[in-house]
Amino acid sequence: MSTIQVIRHAIGGRCCLMLTYRNYSRVVEPYALGVDAVGVLVLRAYQVSGGDEVQPIGWKTFEVAAIAGAAILGERSSEARAPGPDSGGTLNVTC
């Protein structure tokens, strides 16, 4: 399965993903896959753990081309997360 297929499957199944992104492992709750304002395919997700020490958790936008690996982990928490002001800019959603 390609990275995009894994992301789409995780969004549809409401599953957490383990990503390798810019040399850091991260666990994320994926919410949307789409194209940002400059035409880059991105994943909008809430990072639960991992990443760098500066911003280890919170809303993130990940460039799909920079994701080195993605694996489905299982169901995400039942806590609904409303996108906050730090959840990223406008996104033309594809999934």
Image (cartoon, rainbow, N blue to C red):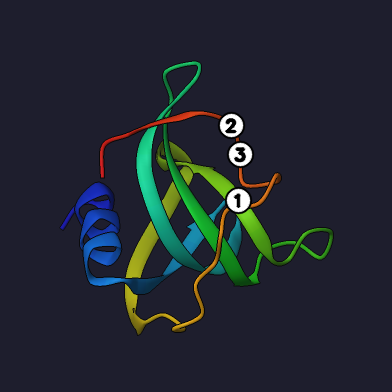
For this view, does 64 lie left or right of residue 11?
A: right
Spot occupied by residue 49 in the image (x, y as percentages of width and height): 63, 74
Label 1, residues with CA under 10 Å away: few <14, some 14-19, many ≥20: some
Q: Viewer-proximal residue, 95 or 21?
A: 95
Spot occupied by residue 52 in the image (x, y as percentages of width and height): 75, 61
Where disc 1 sits, the SS reads strand
- The residue type indicated by label 3 comes to Gly
- Residue that appears at 26% across and 45% down: 95
Where disc 3 sits, the SS reads loop
- Residue that appears at 23% across and 71% down: 13
Please tell me whether residue 47 is drawn above or below residue 72 in the rendered image.
above
Quarter occupied by the N terminus: bottom left
Residue labelled with disc 1: 60
Q: Earlier in the sequence, mark 2 or mark 1?
A: 1
Tag in front: 1 or 3: 3
Kindly indicate whether the residue at mark 3 contacts the one at mark 1 (C-beta within 8 angstroms). yes
- Residue that appears at 44% across and 49% down: 67
Label 3, residues with CA under 10 Å away: few <14, some 14-19, many ≥20: some
Kindly indicate whether the residue at mark 3 contacts the one at mark 2 (C-beta within 8 angstroms). yes
Q: Viewer-proximal residue, 52 or 93?
A: 93
Q: Which mark is residue 89?
A: 2
Residue labelled with disc 3: 88
- Residue that appears at 56% across and 67% down: 26
Q: Earlier in the sequence, mark 1 or mark 3?
A: 1
- The residue type indicated by label 1 comes to Lys
